[in-house]
Image: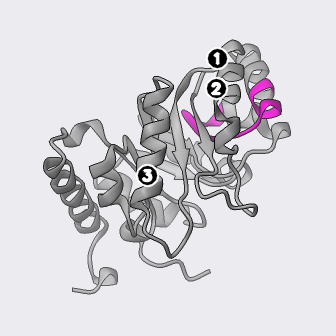
């Protein structure tokens, strides 16, 4: 059956079943993996069926877009969890800390400082992942692998609630080696969280240790924008 003919509940069930299968192959408990429905460019009307189907964790790329649709959705469903998975400008740190429960794209000391100050001002402490430029791609965000130890030290000294690492492997390549390297770096630095895996490769990510998978197309269908 084509994806567009399936309901949100069907797509959610299929994705959860695939996560559970991959977790089982790796000897992991499926409930230790958080499925983030990536709702960037999706309207509140497109998101609502997933919420109605029982899903609670969502991811957005941009602070401004999230501000336009999530306050009303959260008012109707207060237990929603919202994750920022896109690049964050330091001048948006206050808004991000106010809106999101987790920030996956911390990648430089200036952003660490801005977030630490925003958390101190607001009293909110969203979980933070350090984004690693695991494929060493100049066009992508994320800190260089060689800079990661210093950034971890800086974030910990600033008091950021550091949860783990995030990566986006190069497109059109086998993702497994990049996931494995990210997992190795996280273990080396004592970080338990691994935000990795999207619609095309999340089962591989789960088998390698992902704790958060970021899935858009498999839950919403292909974007028309």
List the residue tagged with mark 2. Answer: 152
Task: Say whether residue 99 is magenta.
Answer: yes
Q: Residue at x 40, y 66 (%)?
A: 199
In the rendering, at what x and y percent does residue 196 appear? 45, 50
Residue 104 appears in the rendering:
no
Task: Say whether residue 124 is magenta.
Answer: no
Q: Which element type, helix, strand or loop, lies under badge 2?
A: helix
Question: Cβ–Cβ below 8 Å for labels 1 and 2?
Answer: yes
List the residue tagged with mark 1. Answer: 156
List the residue tagged with mark 3. Answer: 179
Residue closer to the observer: 166 or 208: 208
Q: Which element type, helix, strand or loop, lies under badge 3?
A: helix
In the rendering, at what x and y percent does residue 221 appear? 42, 76
Q: Where, by quadrant of the figure, is residue 153 drawn?
A: top right
| The C terminus: image quadrant | bottom right
Asked if 30 appears above or below 191 in the picture, the reply is below
Quick one: label 2 or label 3, which is nearer the N terminus? Answer: 2
The stretch in magenta equals: 98-113
In the rendering, at what x and y percent does residue 11 appear? 28, 67
């Amino acid at each position: 059956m084509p994806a567009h003919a399936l309901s949100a509940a069907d797509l959610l069930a299929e994705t959860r079943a695939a996560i559970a299968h991959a977790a089982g192959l790796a000897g992991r408990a499926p409930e230790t993996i958080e499925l983030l429905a990536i709702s960037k460019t999706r309207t509140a009307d497109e998101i609502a069926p997933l919420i109605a189907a029982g899903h609670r964790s969502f991811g957005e790329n941009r602070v401004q877009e999230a501000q336009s649709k999530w306050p009303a959705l959260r008012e109707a469903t207060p237990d929603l969890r919202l994750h920022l998975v896109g690049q964050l400008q330091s001048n948006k740190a206050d808004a991000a800390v106010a809106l999101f429960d987790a920030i996956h794209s911390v990648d430089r000391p200036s952003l660490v400082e801005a977030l630490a100050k925003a958390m101190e001002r607001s009293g909110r402490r969203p979980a933070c992942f350090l984004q690693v430029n695991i494929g060493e791609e100049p066009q992508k965000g994320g800190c260089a692998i060689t800079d990661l130890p210093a950034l971890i030290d800086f974030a910990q000294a600033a008091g950021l609630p550091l949860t783990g690492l995030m990566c986006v492997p190069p497109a059109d390549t086998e993702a497994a080696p990049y996931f494995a390297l990210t997992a190795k770096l996280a273990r080396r630095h004592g970080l338990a969280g691994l935000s990795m895996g999207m619609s095309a490769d999340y089962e591989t990510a789960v088998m390698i240790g992902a704790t958060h998978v970021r899935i858009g197309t498999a839950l919403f269908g292909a974007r028309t924008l």
